[in-house]
Amino acid sequence: MHPIFGYGIFAVVLFLIFQFMFSISAIPMDWIDSIFLNFSQYLQGILPEGIFTDLLTQGIVPGIGGVLVFVPQIAILFFFIGVLEETGYMTRVVFIMDRLVRPFGLNGRSVVPLVSSAACAIPAILSTRVIGNPKERLITILVSPLISCSARIPVFVLLIYLVIPNTYMYGFIGLQGTVLFAMYALGVIGALFVAMVMNKFIRSKEKSFLLLELPEYRWPRWKNILLHLKEKVQAFVFDAGKIILAISIVLWAFAAFPKINEEQVAQGKTQIEESYLGQAGKSIAPVFAPLGYDWKMTVSLLTSFAAREVFVGTMATLYSAGENFEEDESLLQRMREDVNLQTGKPAYSLASGLSLMVFYVFAMQCMATFAAVKRETKSWKWPLIQMGYMGFMAYTLALLTFNLFS
């Protein structure tokens, strides 16, 4: 709670959490990835050729694997958040952050929804009801989705593994964990900047104050943490999983038809490029080409407007459609080997990977959050403003990032 060192301690705590997320989760993630790859190979070997086999091995199994492979990362994040809450430290974070966020039109109670947004923006938006000042509550609602939620973790992790080397600075600071921390920090900076701008435009004569009882420090109740952890992991697997699996099946159908003929194969054309999905992606791709994205990334962006984590399921389906699994390649390997047809260069470079991560930091891409904002503000005006400014920031900053690192 020190007026200076308290902020540094909080930053170090968060930094260490992200370092642990990558260092601890790598082994179980590789294990889960290999299980689903081997299972797809096994099914393709024992089942007769046909549409049903392709649906299982290229649609359903990769879709489920695309969900479960990120459970270790999400479980580690919520475990540490649970520890911070159980020990009484999170309440102290609210107290010290009050002084920091007030110049931006927020108060210490806004910190609870903003921290909660690291799990999901929807309950965070609902929790703004404890903020008595209408102006501060509205600003908190409008900036909460800028804090990176758990749905973005699969996207960040996949892209970080693709474009950021697994190296260590000074022998112990992992570069991958540092980049993940940077993405979260970028969201926080963006939220504070937008809050500052809105504080100038949204007028209110009401003054607010923070009255808070600080609990004693205590050892965490591990049972409570495990119950909280179980609840959050189940919510991700079953709630997000149902959406991802359904979209994976639909995407597989669009990627599997129409079937290409032998003449097209001889011309070097592939099933995925000539499919309905490939044709649609190529027609829209020019809009996102300045950001360094190819048609596959474009398709994944569009499908993930239903829910951000759908991006990974879409990628799993796109890179599995037409795959015979004779080569023992994981999704990451297939993505690393992919080439951008327009540039002839690797599709996932440092520039395009960072640009895509920045886009996901700022883009709305969650219809459920849009609906929650509409319900809480009782107006279409504010969710439309929110989607507009977040979309503008996402595209502009992703474009800047791509050109900066190209």
Image (cartoon, rainbow, N blue to C red):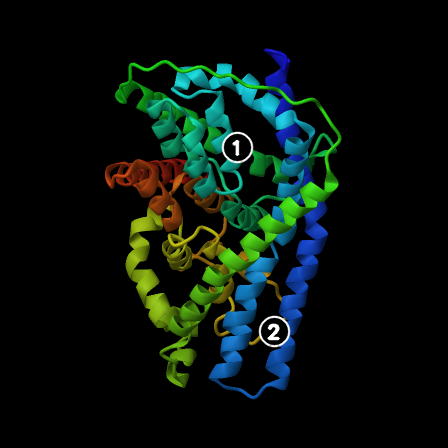
Q: In this view, which residue lies farthest toward the bottom? A: 48
Query: Of 2 and 333, which appears nearest the observer?
Result: 2
Q: Earlier in the sequence, mark 2 or mark 1?
A: 2
Contact check, label 2 and label 1, Cβ < 8 Å: no
Q: Secondary structure at mark 2?
A: helix
Instruction: Examine the rendering and report whether any part of residue 174 can be seen.
Output: no
Rendered residue at 52%/69% (across/down): 320
Answer above or below: position of 268 versus 11.
below
Rendered residue at 50%/71% (across/down): 59
Amino acid type shown at disc 1: Val
Q: Residue 45: x, y in percent?
A: 63, 83
Rendered residue at 52%/60% (across/down): 241
Q: CA distance from mark 2 to mark 1?
A: 39 Å
Q: Secondary structure at mark 1?
A: helix
* Mark 1: few/some/many CA within 10 Å (<14, 14-19, 20+): many
Instruction: Examine the rendering and report whether any part of residue 271 can be seen.
Output: yes
Q: Residue 134: x, y in percent?
A: 33, 25
Q: Which of pointers 2 and 1 indicates the residue nearer the eye? A: 1
Answer above or below: position of 188 versus 3.
below
Q: Residue 117: x, y in percent?
A: 49, 37
Quarter assignment of residue 400: top left
Mark drawn on residue 107: none
Query: Of 81 and 204, which appears nearest the observer?
Result: 204
* Image quarter in which the N terminus is found: top right
According to the image, label 2 marks what residue? 40
Amino acid type shown at disc 2: Ser
According to the image, label 1 marks what residue? 115
Answer above or below: position of 194 versus 396.
above
